[in-house]
Amino acid sequence: MKTLILGLGNDFIADDGAGVEAARLLEGELRGLDDVEVMECALSGAALLDILIDYDRVILIDAVKTGQVKPGTISELWLEDLGEVIAPSPHYAGLPELLALARQLELNFPREFVIFAVETEDPYTIGGAMTEPVRAALPEVVSVVLKRLALWRTAQPCAV
């Protein structure tokens, strides 16, 4: 089973770089595993389609701003949690649209996705530093990703 750990975001925009920074931390932890690849990416929408092809499982790490929980909170989401979204264009396509497109094109697309979303405080300031609550959450992000990966690699039930 080939697994991709994909840290999304832009590290030039304050807390938006949380996924990218977590991926950097995980790279050192997972070096040498042939069945796991760690990647950073600032792309979104349909541009992610090519990146996700030929993996069996994907762990996405990204920053979110919901305003529902305190900054630094880590949420675990599955595709079924996202619901159906109809994007106004391919630039705004999310995972549900990508999955539907991959099925329609009969692409070798991951069967399992889990998203670890880090609630942000400041996802807007260009050139801004990552806020303390988000930076403090990064070790826990690494920990939950490693737990999920260990469960997948030992084929145990998916519960973190």
Image: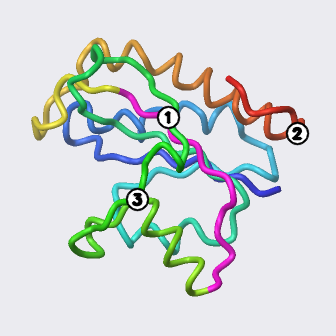
Q: Would you identify the image quadrant in which residue 70 lies? A: top left
Indicate which disc residue 116 carries.
1
Q: Tell me which label, 1 or 3, sits earlier in the chain.
A: 3
Identify the element where label 3 is drawn: loop
Q: Give the camera-side residue of 114 and 37.
A: 114
Q: Position of residue 89 (x, y in %)?
A: 24, 75
CB of mark 1 within 8 Å of CB of mark 3? no
**Circle 1: residue type:** Phe
Disc 2 designates what residue?
Answer: 155
Q: Give the camera-side residue of 124 and 83.
A: 83
Q: Would you identify the image quadrant in which residue 28 lies? A: top right
Q: Quadrant of the N terminus?
A: bottom right
Toward the bottom, the furthest residue is: 105
Toward the front, the furthest residue is: 84
Q: Quadrant of the C terminus?
A: top right
Q: Give the camera-side residue of 14 and 122.
A: 122
Please tell me whether mark 2 or mark 3 is closer to you in this view: 3
Q: Position of residue 42 (x, y in %)?
A: 34, 55
Is 44 colored magenta in this rendering?
A: no
Q: Tell me which label, 2 or 3, sits earlier in the chain.
A: 3
Identify the element where label 1 is drawn: strand
Q: Give the camera-side residue of 44 and 81.
A: 81
Q: Which residues are magenta?
A: 106-118
**Circle 2: residue type:** Ala
Q: CA distance from mark 1 to mark 3?
A: 19 Å
Please tell me whether mark 1 or mark 3 is closer to you in this view: 3
CB of mark 2 within 8 Å of CB of mark 3? no
Residue found 40% across the figure and 40% down from its top = 62
**Circle 3: residue type:** Glu
Is 111 colored magenta in this rendering?
A: yes
Indicate which disc residue 84 carries.
3
* Placement of 142 over or under 46, stated as above or below: above
